[in-house]
Amino acid sequence: MAEGSELGIIAQTPRVNVLGVEISTLPVDGAIEFIGRTIIAGDRAVLSYVNVYALNLAYENPWFKEFLNHAALTFCDGFGVKWGARLLGHKIPERYTPPDWFPRLAYACSLRRFTLYFLGARPGIGEKCANLLRNQFPGLIVTGSHHGYFDKSQESPENQAVIELINKEKPDILVVGLGMPVQEKWLKENWDQMNAKVALPVGAMFDYLTGEVARAPRWMPDHGLEWLGRLVVEPKRLSQRYILGNPLFVGRLLKQRFGILE
């Protein structure tokens, strides 16, 4: 078995350091193959992703940085991270965000008969997403779903009930869309109780795939402007994340670039 951690095995892939977070340079096909190998081997692994918001959170919250660095595979979710890595002299060849690459994973799961469980979003959205993907990929097995509106305190009866529901299904892949950093905190506290092989945090993916929340026009994410599109769609929720967070990120990158990172 590969080197382990409390989050399971760690993929032995090249990584680059941005603001103290080790980010994998594995392309999306490699990530899908890693998930498949983990399931077939009977191992366990938690994956994660980083964008500018995540790296700012990690800079300010040691527990979150530790989570990212102990995940089996922490991949690049944003052009800001690719740009930041380039400023530091590194190259991240591919950026992949869950709403874009998850259908490819779903297709692979439908071929290999891997099972999934969806956790997150408002009531009914997980099942709506499951039906959409089942129609797109016949043979896909989503064994169940549960909304994200429950008491996530580690010992709460609601939290334990959700864990029992998931464990009853024994999914190969637990897809967690509780938003960042709630989903990472929930996995950090509960992963050792979970009867699942792979955990994949996906943020607001269920809402995006089902059309509950509009995405920016395709040309914007293709040119590194998805953050601006999201800000236009959800200004109240995301203004602080981007208007304040992006300049903070640039300043912190420059500190690392010139060797004065705190």
Image (tube, rainbow, N blue to C red):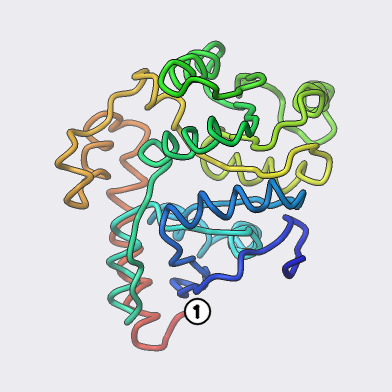
Report helix, strand or loop for mark 1. Answer: loop
Specify few, some or many for label 1: CA neighbours under 10 Å numbering under 14, 14-19, or 20 or more.
few
Counting from the top left corner in percent of width and height, residue 174 is at 65, 35
Vertical placement of residue 44 versus 261, above or below:
above
Counting from the top left corner in percent of width and height, residue 35 is at 59, 49
Vertical placement of residue 155 versus 45, above or below:
above
Residue toward you, 106 or 196? 106
Give the tally of numbered discs. 1
Q: For the point 52% across and 43% down, which residue is it?
A: 180
Vertical placement of residue 147 versus 183, above or below:
above
Q: For the point 30% across and 59% down, which residue is it?
A: 80
Point out the residue furthest to the front here.
111
Residue toward you, 116 or 254? 116
Residue toward you, 141 or 65? 141
Counting from the top left corner in percent of width and height, residue 49 is at 49, 52
Identify the residue under disc 1.
262
Vertical placement of residue 42 versus 175, above or below:
below
Kind of residue at badge 1: Glu
- Image quadrant of residue 233? top left
Q: For the point 35% across and 62% down, which residue is it?
A: 81
Q: Left or right? Give the position of 104 relative to 93.
A: right
Q: Left or right? Give the position of 121 relative to 170.
A: left
Q: For the point 26% across and 37% down, which residue is it?
A: 231
Counting from the top left corner in percent of width and height, residue 178 is at 56, 33
- Split into 4 quadrants, where in the image is the N terminus? bottom right
Point out the residue furthest to the bottom here.
259
Q: Left or right? Give the position of 229 relative to 60.
A: left
